[in-house]
Amino acid sequence: MKLKRKTKLKSEIPTASMPDIIFMLLIFFMVTTVLREYSGLPISLPKAKRIEKLKSKRHTSHIWVSKDGLISIEDKLYASDGIRHVMYEKRVADPQLVVSLKADERAKMGLISAIHSELRKADALKLNYSTKTAVD
Amino acid sequence: MKWIPQKREKNKESMTEKRRFKGGEIPTSSMADIAFLLLIFFLVTTTIDMDKGLGMVLPAEGEEIEISKKNILNCLINSSGNVLLGGEGIEVRNLSKTVRQKLAENEKLVISVKAHKAATYKDYVAVIDQLKRANATRISIAESN
């Protein structure tokens, strides 16, 4: 004999609050997304294995160095002896400044050491050689 | 077509009936879909590019410390990417092993990296990476001249 269920069980996922949940997620993503401020120069970064992450984007300032020896900070081109003024101002504004050097792997070391000495003069001593992760 | 005035009057009646306010509602059933679309758009367009690289702290200007010669290990890079460690030529990939041995012998060892002007940044980063792999903390960057 077949038993018939007297009361039909309603099994439905409540979807009324779905938009709210999705909106929450959406707002989270919108707030946490940091749009890229500066486009920089086209470079191919060198690869390294012992890398560390930069702690915060807020305290990071980038210097782009292309293979042709162009130096770009915040989408403005500088000569190698003009870096110290820019970096000094940045360093005064933010004592926790970390300079991220995004140099092309074919850049010449003469230029890189010029940047080193400029950064030393600007007292921006925390440097990070931006690299890709090497796989081997 | 023929004009039927009676019908028109009937229509008028029904229109007055319709004018009664029924309460407007915004359809919310598609809200979730719209929100999902926006969410997916943001998920796709967000690029989380973590900045990573080799950390280095430069010495302050005018801060020069005299180091006795026996505690210095010179590491020279020439323009074609060859590396000279303490006067001997060495392959870059063997650098960390050798440096590790030398560090075990002498804890106070300072590795002075000196690159030729025309050496590429790639070779320099490779050398620094090798030194970091050998857990060398005292790395000095000599000015190339």
Image: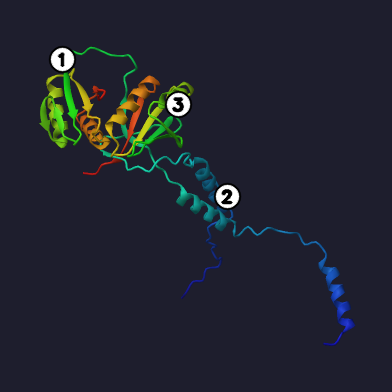
SS state under label 1: helix
Circle 2 chain? A
Does B66 sit above or below residue A79? Answer: above
Q: Residue A64, position in %: x, y?
A: 38, 36
- Report x, y in % for residue B142: 25, 22
Q: Which residue is mark 1?
A: B69
In this view, the residue in front, B24 or A74, is A74
Specify the subunit that label 1 lies on: B
Judge if badges 2 and 3 mark residues of a common chain.
yes
Residue A15 at least partly seen: no
Snapshot quadrant of residue B124? top left
Q: Residue A86 bears which disc, if any? A: 3
Q: Residue A114, image x and y in percent?
A: 33, 26
The amino acid type of the residue labelled 2 equals Asp
Tag 1 and tag 3, C-beta contact below 8 Å: no
Name the mark nearer the viewer: 1 or 3. Answer: 3
Left or right side of B23 for A62: left
Above/below status of A133 relative to B139 = below
Residue A111 visible in rendering: yes
**Distance CA(mark 2)–CA(mark 1):** 69 Å
Name the spot of residue B28 as percent of width and height, x first.
Answer: 63, 57
- Where B47 sits versus A115, above or below? below
- Chain where mark 3 sits: A
Of mark 2 and mark 3, the one earlier in the sequence is 2
Circle 2 or circle 1, nearest the eye: 1
Image quadrant where residue B88 sits: top left
Q: Which mark is residue A20?
A: 2
Label 1, label 3: how far apart the Cα atoms are: 37 Å
